[in-house]
Image: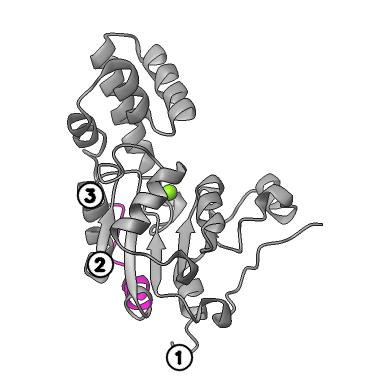
Amino acid sequence: MEKKPKTSPDPADFANVRDWVFDLDNTLYPHHINLFAQIDVNMTAYVQELLQVEREEARALQKRYYHEHGTTLQGLMLNHGIDPDSFLERAHAIDYSALLPDTDLGDAIKALPGRKFIFTNGSVPHAEAAARALGILDHFDDIFDIVAAGYVPKPAGETYDKFASLHRVDTANAVMFEDLPRNLQVPKALGMRTVLLVPRNLDTVLIERWETLTEEDDHIDYMTDDLTSFLKGMQPTL
Ligand SMILES: [Mg+2]
């Protein structure tokens, strides 16, 4: 009944992988860096100014849109017809100095055989800024962002289809790395290998939750709190 995701990679599982697909936030850099806290504050301010409401009200609406539409942006576009570019620019006007060059991660990504993509619900400028700060930008073939997705965020199936057809990704020979379990459901259904990134030092409640994953988590093949070690572990020659 209970199927636990594996924590150390079996290289045989990844031997036929030709396309390596990475979410950006909390995946290519660890959760505890918490860049999202800055983005979150910027989004609240945007909603506050747009609708001329108090901070609390703006925040409640922001979260409602996130839950109802997958991103705050999508909710604002559908309900208020906002210009997505100005929103994205504002949301991602953050300080990237918490991200430091990660040579080990860069080397591990560079050594992967095949193409490497960033597939993010954020924007290309945000992904570029973050990946550049980490010193890993040059190792990626392309970035598929929320604009390329027509502003329809993961986990919508059409967005994965758009990504796969644009880049001619054979999903049977691809793997997806993500920190949000729900964003791995479609990839698994498409035949991709799925790797969930979890925060380091998970608190006890969370660990118990992860250790007792249920059938609904069957779409997660692997989980790890250390992307670099995981990538190295799947390449026996490293
Ligand atoms: Mg993420």
Relative to 4, does residue 158 appear above or below in the rendering? above
Is residue 107 rendered magenta in the image?
A: yes
* CB contact under 8 Å: marks 2 and 1: no
The quarter holding residue 102 reads bottom left
Q: Residue at x 26, y 9 (%)?
A: 52
Mark 1 Cα shell of 10 Å, populated few (<14), some (14-19), many (≥20): few
Front of the two marks 1 and 3:
3
Mark 2 Cα shell of 10 Å, populated few (<14), some (14-19), many (≥20): few
Determine whether the residue tagged by mark 1 lies in a helix, strand or loop: loop
Q: Which residue is mark 3?
A: 124
Q: Which residues are magenta?
A: 98-108
Is residue 187 rendered magenta in the image?
A: no
- The mark nearer the N terminus, 2 or 1, is 2
- The mark nearer the N terminus, 1 or 3, is 3
Q: Residue at x 37, y 65 (%)?
A: 169
The three-letter amino acid code for the residue at tag 1 is: Thr
The C terminus - image quarter: bottom left
Q: Please state if 237 lies on the left or on the right of 101 as rendered.
A: right
Determine whether the residue tagged by mark 3 lies in a helix, strand or loop: helix
The three-letter amino acid code for the residue at tag 3 is: Val
* Residue most extreme to the right: 1
Front of the two marks 2 and 1:
2
Q: Which residue is mark 1?
A: 237
Q: Which residue is mark 2?
A: 141
Tell how many labels. 3
Q: Nearer the viewer, residue 133 or 82?
A: 82
Residue 221 in the image, given as x and y percentages of width and height: 61, 63
